[in-house]
Image (spheres, helix red, strand yellow):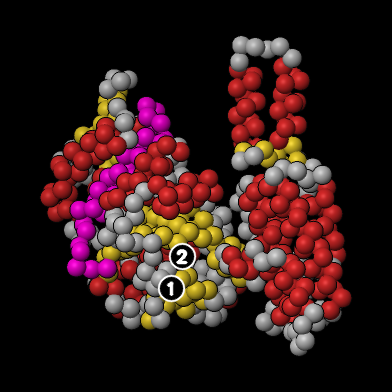
């Protein structure tokens, strides 16, 4: 699969092209950036019958069925433009005409591993978007083998004392056993096992189902949306290794909102784990004032001096330059947000408001406020209570960042209306003025200062 194109679809108000180029994809995006909407697009393309079947039953009048389908499809339109149809294409083909039979697609999301009182394998497989025509037959054929494989992986791959036993029956209930703690339960599991272990068990069962469904005669696609959120760092590493090694014949799309996991996974697929013939593209998905965009490194890292040279060249288009400078500024805003790990925010103006707020920001080398809290807890729990208050204050001071310089630059940028809050020009420039060369020159100067500040922030040397 090379690309998917969306327009007026879910959160994608503007046309958006997601280029895959037959590569594996590791995609980072904060909550609200559009990852779930991309996943929903794949679900609609390859599992429309599953989406409809919950509300359509045998014998229902044809017109009523069509009305229900229409109501379901309406929910995929961008909320602000419900009067307009959405567009969805794969490799240039409308999703209604795309030859889905030549593909085998498995889609697993964080919702598929929700912690519940009991693990019923039949229900897990029914809930997930997997190409299983008959779940009962599949479990009759593979449940025993899956039990053996999960236990082997837990022991040898993840070095866990946890084991499972799958009951043969209508729902294939899983009993969990922890020999080190002498625990054996099939109900009220969260009372006895931590969330990460329950997620690990469920994820392994899902992955083994995908493995046993593998059909090499088809184009195989595996889509994972925030599946490993609850795992600790070591187990995420084990899972990434397992995924890359087990599904080497698949095209893998891995979406995550966890920036630390993104950096770990990027290192693994580029440096540490042999990935065979499949290349990995690692990128970021952002929601800007001008729509959604995958990180364009050429524009995002462009030196402001290059804009200055362009501005002084004959025949420069001031409106186009204003647009590009605003985009470059928004990339810088998100770069600051990512450095400070400010949390899930959607619109650039919200990111900007958070950065410009009077709240303290904490950063030390590659550590953030969460690491500071951990260090304070360790200090509080230590036996040495001498000068406790001073030692805690010293730690806070080590992490504390003076953001005054950045605040001053950003506030001036807002005054010049070059930020996302008041864009100078879009494709449609109604209601906006054409920027002057003087305004753009001042913007470039401020952008240059902002870039210097970001570099200092990376080194934690803001003065």
Vertical placement of residue 385 versus 323, above or below: above
Q: Does the residue at mark 2 contact the one at mark 1 (Cβ under 8 Å)?
A: yes
Q: Is residue 37 magenta?
A: no
- Locate the C terminus by quadrant: top right
- Locate the N terminus by quadrant: bottom left
Which residue occupies the foreground of this view, 375 or 186? 375
Secondary structure type for disc 1:
strand
Tell me what residue is drawn at x 31 percent, y 31 percent: 159
Position of 12 with respect to 117 (left or right) is right
The residue that mark 1 highlights is 4
**Where does the image place residue 4, in percent across and percent down from the top left?**
43, 73
Furthest-bottom residue in view? 315
Vertical placement of residue 137 versus 218, above or below: above
Which residue occupies the foreground of this view, 148 or 10? 148
The stretch in magenta equals 190-219
**Where does the image place residue 370, in percent across and percent down from the top left?**
61, 36
The residue that mark 2 highlights is 38
Answer yes or no: is residue 350 visible.
no
Q: Is residue 195 magenta?
A: yes
**Where does the image place residue 274, in percent across and percent down from the top left?**
34, 51
Tell me what residue is drawn at x 55 percent, y 66 percent: 294
Secondary structure, magenta segment, majority class = helix
In the rendered structure, which disc, 2 or 1, sits on the residue that comes first in sequence? 1
- Cα separation, mark 2 vs mark 1, equals 9 Å
Which residue occupies the foreground of this view, 69 or 144? 144
- Kindly report which numbered mark, 2 or 1, lies closer to the viewer in this rendering: 1
């Amino acid at each position: 699969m090379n690309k998917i194109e969306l327009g007026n679809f879910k959160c994608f108000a503007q046309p958006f092209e997601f280029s895959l180029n037959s590569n594996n994809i590791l995609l980072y995006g904060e909550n609200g950036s559009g990852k779930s909407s991309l996943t929903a697009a794949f679900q609609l393309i390859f599992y429309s019958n599953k989406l409809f079947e919950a509300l359509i039953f045998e014998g229902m009048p044809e017109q009523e069925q069509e009305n229900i389908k229409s109501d379901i499809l309406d929910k995929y339109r961008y909320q602000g433009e419900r009067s307009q149809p959405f567009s969805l294409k794969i490799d240039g083909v409308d999703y209604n005409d795309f030859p889905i039979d030549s593909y085998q697609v498995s889609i697993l999301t964080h919702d598929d591993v929700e912690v519940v009182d009991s693990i019923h394998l039949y229900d897990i497989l029914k809930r997930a978007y997997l190409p299983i025509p008959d779940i009962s037959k599949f479990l009759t054929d593979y449940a025993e083998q899956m039990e053996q494989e999960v236990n082997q992986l837990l022991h040898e791959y993840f070095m866990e004392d946890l084991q499972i036993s799958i009951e043969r029956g209508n729902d294939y209930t899983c009993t969990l056993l922890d020999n080190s703690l002498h625990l054996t339960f099939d109900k009220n599991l969260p009372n006895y096992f931590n969330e990460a272990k329950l997620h690990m068990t469920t994820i392994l069962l899902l992955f083994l189902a995908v493995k046993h469904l593998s059909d090499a005669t088809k184009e195989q696609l595996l889509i994972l949306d925030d599946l490993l959120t609850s795992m600790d760092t070591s187990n995420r590493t084990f899972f990434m290794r397992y995924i890359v090694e087990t599904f080497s014949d698949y095209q893998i799309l891995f979406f995550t909102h966890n920036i630390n996991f993104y950096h770990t996974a990027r290192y693994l697929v580029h440096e540490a784990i042999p990935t065979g013939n499949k290349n990995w593209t690692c990128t970021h998905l952002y929601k800007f004032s001008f729509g959604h965009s995958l990180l364009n490194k050429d524009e995002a890292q462009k030196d402001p001096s290059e804009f200055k040279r362009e501005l002084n060249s004959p025949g420069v288009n001031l409106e186009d330059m204003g647009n590009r400078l605003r985009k470059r500024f928004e990339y810088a805003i998100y770069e600051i947000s990512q450095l400070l790990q400010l949390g899930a925010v959607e619109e650039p103006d919200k990111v900007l408001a958070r950065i410009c707020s009077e709240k303290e920001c904490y950063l030390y080398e590659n550590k953030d406020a969460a690491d500071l809290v951990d260090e304070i807890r360790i200090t509080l729990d230590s036996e040495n209570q001498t000068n406790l208050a001073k030692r805690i204050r010293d730690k806070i001071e080590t992490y504390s960042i003076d953001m005054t310089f950045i605040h001053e630059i950003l506030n001036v940028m807002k005054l010049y209306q070059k930020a996302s809050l008041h864009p100078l020009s879009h494709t449609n420039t109604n209601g906006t003025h054409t920027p002057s060369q003087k305004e753009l020159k001042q913007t470039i100067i401020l952008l240059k200062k902002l870039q210097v500040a970001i570099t200092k922030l990376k080194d934690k040397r803001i003065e």
